[in-house]
Image (cartoon, helix red, strand yellow):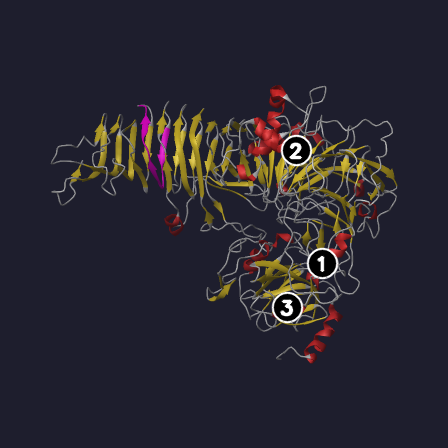
Amino acid sequence: MRFTHTTPFCSVLSTLGLFAVSPAYSSIVRNDVDYQYFRDFAENKGAFAVGASNISIQDKQGKILGRVLNGIPMPDFRVSNRQTAIATLIHPQYVNSVKHNVGYGSIQFGNDTQNPEEQAYTYRLVSRNPHPDYDYHLPRLNKLVTEISPAALSSVPLLGNGQPKANAYLDTDRFPYFVRLGSGTQQVRKADGTRTRTAPAYQYLTGGTPLKVLGFQNHGLLVGGSLTDQPLNTYAIAGDSGSPLFAFDKHENRWVLAGVLSTYAGFDNFFNKYIVTQPEFIRSTIRQYETRLDVGLTTNELIWRDNGNGDSTLQGLNERITLPIANPSLAPQNDSRHMPSEDAGKTLILSSRFDNKTLMLADNINQGAGALQFDSNFTVVGKNHTWQGAGVIVADGKRVFWQVSNPKGDRLSKLGAGTLIANGQGINQGDISIGEGTVVLAQKAASDGSKQAFNQVGITSGRGTAVLADSQQIKPENLYFGFRGGRLDLNGNNLAFTHIRHADGGAQIVNHNPDQAATLTLTGNPVLSPEHVEWVQWGNRPQGNAAVYEYINPHRNRRTDYFILKPGGNPREFFPLNMENSTSWQFIGNNRQQAAKQVAQAENARPDLITFGGYLGENAQTGKAAPSYSKTNIEWVNGPNTPHKPSPYTNTPTRTGAGVPTITASKKAATPAPTSHGMPTAPKTGNFSDMTGEAAIEKTRHIANAAVYGRPEYRYNGALNLHYRPKRTDSTLLLNGGMNLNGEVLIEGGNMIVSGRPVPHAYDHQAKREPVLENEWTDGSFKAARFTLRNHARLTAGRNTAHLDGDITAYDLSGIDLGFIQGKTPECYRSYHSGSTHCTPNAVLKAENYRALPATQVRGDITLNDRSELRLGKAHLYGSIRAGKDTAVRMEADSNWTLSQSSHTGALTLDGAQITLNPDFANNTHNNRFNTLTVNGTLDGFGTFRFLTGIVRKQNAPPSNWKGTAAAHSKSTSKTPDKNLKQPNRLHL
């Protein structure tokens, strides 16, 4: 059947609404294409990483079906909630979907994995905000979302009633490409129409291109066609309701959210309707939840009181202002899918008119789902009072001194490119999630010396930086890098971890301090005692491997059963009743002490394998160091009149003439502010403007410098040391994210492996495995000023280590392995899905994959002491070796060594290796430089020596000296720099 943009076409599609509320069925895809394509597409994995383009698609027989994303970058799908994608973030606190999706009351963002270090936060819907006319709603969340930036909205023209022109998306010159993702009961479809179900509803995501955009009706885009029209076409069914449709806008050169799925036309008609996003409705809905203060202050202090019953008062303005906050008297509705008590709180926007003012809490303030947005420099104080709300936004170029705590169990969301300086006093039991900008942790000590800026500190989205004013600001075990991570700036301080909790490769630890070195220490896990096993409640995932679940079995006379969760198991699967195992659970007995002992023994029997997949050091240097003169930095944190840059989160999307409720100055003469009824005035300790003299400047130097060093324009790669001091002799630390350290890597025992890592793929739910392909690894590069090995330590540069730069010194029978060796080098990686580290001790790659491996380029001088050894695999060493007589150097096949200067070794064994004595042998330059290799031990094996000579001028030094037993079968190739010699000399030794 052929369709055109006619009235009959629209009338046919109008019947599609009959299917809108049918039971959830499926996302349907073609069966002649590997299913992994659709899984990877939906999760931005495999070939479909954000920004990828021109991706070739093959069928299962290897035939190329075509390309997707031709000349167009892959969009970021993580703006939709993980696992189901039924809602998409369009503002830090609002998602959009269809209003017939009534069953969800919370959502999460990030990767859909079982990695406990993902630390996915559950955002609760406090209101649903349904559109009065269309199948569309705009739920408000209880917190600002920190994991991801919102999706962009289109600037298509609006009709007179404020509705977007849906037919604008039919302009293929402006919108040439559409993509989608969703969940539901998953199916594949053969060419003959036969369908096979692959998974139940809402288990995982699939994605691809939608059917062809054909027309529009009632502010909806209509799509239809065949699954075989494009290589990755997908058909959305009711289980995908609310899932997003993205369009690439060539005018703005970006992806925009075009609509959300509303209807489908059954299994065989292959038509969908997407409700176009509603910018005017979005703007008006957000506006009703915001209050902008733009009035004058009668003093420098704005005093905030809780009046009870959801009302609060702001005093110190030209007029008395009432702001709605949380109202605990309002009960949850619709099985807690609507939280009126929190929804009552409004967001307070402090405009750029306020500069260097103080907001003082006279009571504990629970703002509910209301946030604080600072468009000016501010200080927030409140002795012994707490603040709780959706979060804090600090505008770019602004700084806020935050001297209040949030309650235990509450998470403060930090957004905005500006700086939040947490410099309250004592111990703050609340948490923080840093999604953007800079947070300086500078808490002051209480009278008993205790201090803690926050309990848990999360850094997520890759846009934020946490800066330590000193090393006592946080408990290292309570720091985590969430989805896409961000930067932890040690700022010249030392910090020690057993391991670093991180979700993915976005984690980064730096030292931006130009004057003071910092040291990061990793110890690995200690031997586990039964008293320290993890006890987990049903439904929750454990943080580690050594975890026990206790079950008081009401079906068996309240017998106590103990279980451990199997790898890949579902913690929400019911416990077995009869002391037996199940798909997810392994029964381990009825005695608590014995269960803990059994789990501890099993954990200690496993090698201690930990991974840091993030980056160490700064890899985005500006080349500009922050001013180290503290007075200059104090002047910045005191808040000079910096230009105001409006927050990108206000009134999204924007339109001329639109705004939020604004409280402006009254035309009446200013009246004195109400008294504080005996409450002390705000202390002048928020900023440093009241401090004078060099002593005061020195006292506040570390806070001011920390604030300045954390600014993006000063990403200086300061001195950062890494110390690995494992508590167990069998410990292995895998680093596979990269390193650029202006400092020392000290390895005092155990094994440190640096390597590349596998290309991530979406989890295969059918095979219950994570695809790890031997021929799909990304390379890693690692640089430090020097590497030092002690106490039987081992440094291994494993597969896909492209570069290793730095001098290496080994003591105490330590070992250095540089470059992959078939059957000898371990292959290690961290599972993206589970977070576990896996190692194959003596890996053997397929011949074609080994040939494709990059040879590790090693630049630096190596020193061997105390019977230490060096082994070169598929690597090229550019540098010298200085080794004692009791040491050994072994060069395997595919290894090369180019001497940067004369060197000496102990025993030297060659297995088809090549040694070049002159650093410029290949290009025959610097002809007067001759290096000597002295072997002070056994020379064994077969290899090639290359060197320059000056036979005519008798300038050649002996290329190699052997002092000991020589049992080598070597050949030497020399080149002469003399112009009258036409051919290189060959010298057989």
Overall secondary structure of the magenta section: strand
Magenta run includes residue 882: yes
Earlier sequence position, callout 2 versus callout 1: 1
Q: Which residue is mark 1?
A: 97
Q: Is residue 734 toward the left or the right of residue 357 in the image? A: left
Q: In which quarter of the view is residue 315 placed?
A: top right
Q: Are marks 3 and 1 in contact (CB under 8 Å)?
A: no
Magenta run includes residue 186: no
Q: Which residue is mark 2?
A: 421
Q: Are marks 2 and 1 in contact (CB under 8 Å)?
A: no
Q: Quadrant of the N terminus?
A: bottom right
Q: Residue 443 appears at what percent x and percent y? A: 67, 28
Q: Quadrant of the C terminus?
A: top left
Specify the segment rendered in magenta: 869-884
Q: Which residue is mark 3?
A: 168
Instruction: Specify the farthest residue to the front.
Output: 669
Residue 588 appears in the figure: no
Q: Is residue 729 toward the left or the right of residue 363 in the image? A: left
